[in-house]
Every structure is written in C-alpha cells, then in structure tokens.
Amino acid sequence: MASMVNIMSPVVSKNLITNFKAFRLKHDLPSLQHTRVDAINNGPIKMMKKYGSRRSIVVSCLDQPISMPNQLSGYDAVMKFYSSINEKNQDQLRNCISNDCFVDDFSFSKPFHGKKEAMKFFEELVNSMGQNVKFCVENVCEGDGYNAAVNWHIEWKGRKIPFTRGCSFYEFTDEGGILVIRNARILIESPIKPGGIALTLLKNITFLFDEFPQVADCMFPGFWGSLMR
C-alpha cells in the first residue's frame, strides 16, 4: 500500500488518482482555478514490502493519467462530467449519460431512471448553482472495470461551502468508444451530526429486531410493498 499524499488545498481539476496500476510521481498539479499548486509535502511514495505479493494500489499525482492510446478512462469520463456541470454545458452533459442510466441521489426519496429523468435532475442542479458555485473534485479512484469513486466538495468563488462534501460512485458503459454514465450513486454530507447517538440508536433498533422479529418484518420495504398490491 502507498502512503497517503498530503493535499493542502484541493481544487476541481486536481489529478489525484488512486488506481489499480503503478504511476510515477510529480510535484505539481494543474488546476482550472489556479495556475499551479505545490501539493506534495511528504516526499516520495513508500511501498511496504509485505504487500509485494498483492496487486499494487498506488496514490500519485499526475499532470495527466498514464494511459495507452485510445484507452478508455474512467478518470477522463468523471472530469468531463463535472466540467460540463461547472461550465453549464448541457449538450456535453447530455453526452456523458447513457440512455438507460440510473441515478440514485440519497438526498431524494426516489432514484432517477433513464436519461430524461437524469437530465432533468442535472439541469435543475446546474440552474441552482448560479454563476459562482463550482464542484471541486478532490480524489478520483478507478477500479479494474469501467467504474470510479469520486470525493468532491462545492465552492463559491473559490471558498468551500459548509456541509457540501460528497462522494459519488459511477459505473460507465462504452458507447461508440466513449464512456458514459450508466449507474450513479451520490452521497452528500449531512448538516446534522448525531455522533454517538447514531450508534446508540442502531444498538437499540437491532436489539428490538432480534427480540421481536415481527416488528422488523413490518419495517422493511417488502412489507409495505405487499400492502400496496
């Protein structure tokens, strides 16, 4: 495993990638908002010998991800998607989404099915951001397949807005040599911080379920679905 890189001021186009490949290390990261950022403070990446037999997972900073010519990249698809939102380019945004996409934003009670519903959601998001709000990507983690996880936050004129940290998980599909989003799950930071209360509540609920299984049956979605039939 690689030691973590110390990032002092994450911004939207910072190419901080965790990938199931080996990467070289650079000392500067480009930015759409700042010309240069000195992001590395802790020296080179150190590999631990005991993980030598495992597949390498390396954290590195690149001007551009290392890839073969014409190789599809989840990183590129992610950055294109967020750039489309930040630039309010709805035509490009539409080209980032598959016709049968599924978008599940956990802030909403129901997911969005298909390109029409997804585009309506993203268009409303873009309109609500105004002219000065931008998504700032902190980390992009690519898996073996066409999938990626992204950590992000939202800024207004370069200043981080409280309670806007989020994490999104994307699955892509190849449509004519272009990766487009087929499945997206979006989680955003809650302004309510229950802390230890949440663990106490979970303990009490699991005890209730174990002692009275019929109560659990009534609370799970399958029970309510059967009543609606």
Image (cartoon, rainbow, N blue to C red):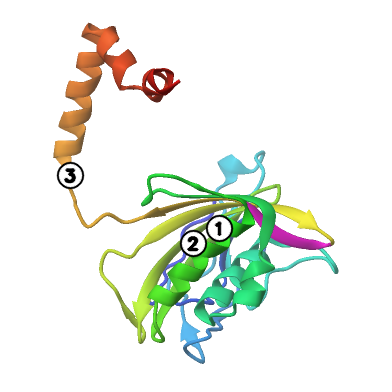
Amino acid marked by disc 3: Gly
The kind of secondary structure element at disc 2 is: helix
Name the disc covering residue 3, or none.
none
What is the number of callouts on the image?
3
Q: Which residue is mark 1?
A: 118
Q: Residue at x 46, y 83 (%)?
A: 38
Q: Residue at x 53, y 74 (%)?
A: 85
Asked if 144 appears above or below 121 in the picture, the reply is above
Q: Which residue is mark 2?
A: 121
Asked if 196 appears above or below 96 in the picture, the reply is above
Is residue 121 visible in the rendered image? The answer is yes
Viewer-proximal residue among 195 and 111: 111
Image-quadrant location for residue 130: bottom left
The kind of secondary structure element at disc 3 is: loop
Residue 168 locus on image (x, y percent): 49, 55
Marks 2 and 3, how far apart at CA: 31 Å
Q: Mainly helix, strand or loop, the magenta region?
A: strand
Residues rendered magenta in the picture: 177-182
Q: Which of the two discs, 2 and 3, sits closer to the camera? A: 2
Q: Which residue is mark 3?
A: 195
Amino acid marked by disc 1: Ala
Which of disc 3 and disc 1 is earlier in sequence? 1
| Residues marked 1 and 2 touching at CB (< 8 Å) | yes
Marks 1 and 3, how far apart at CA: 33 Å
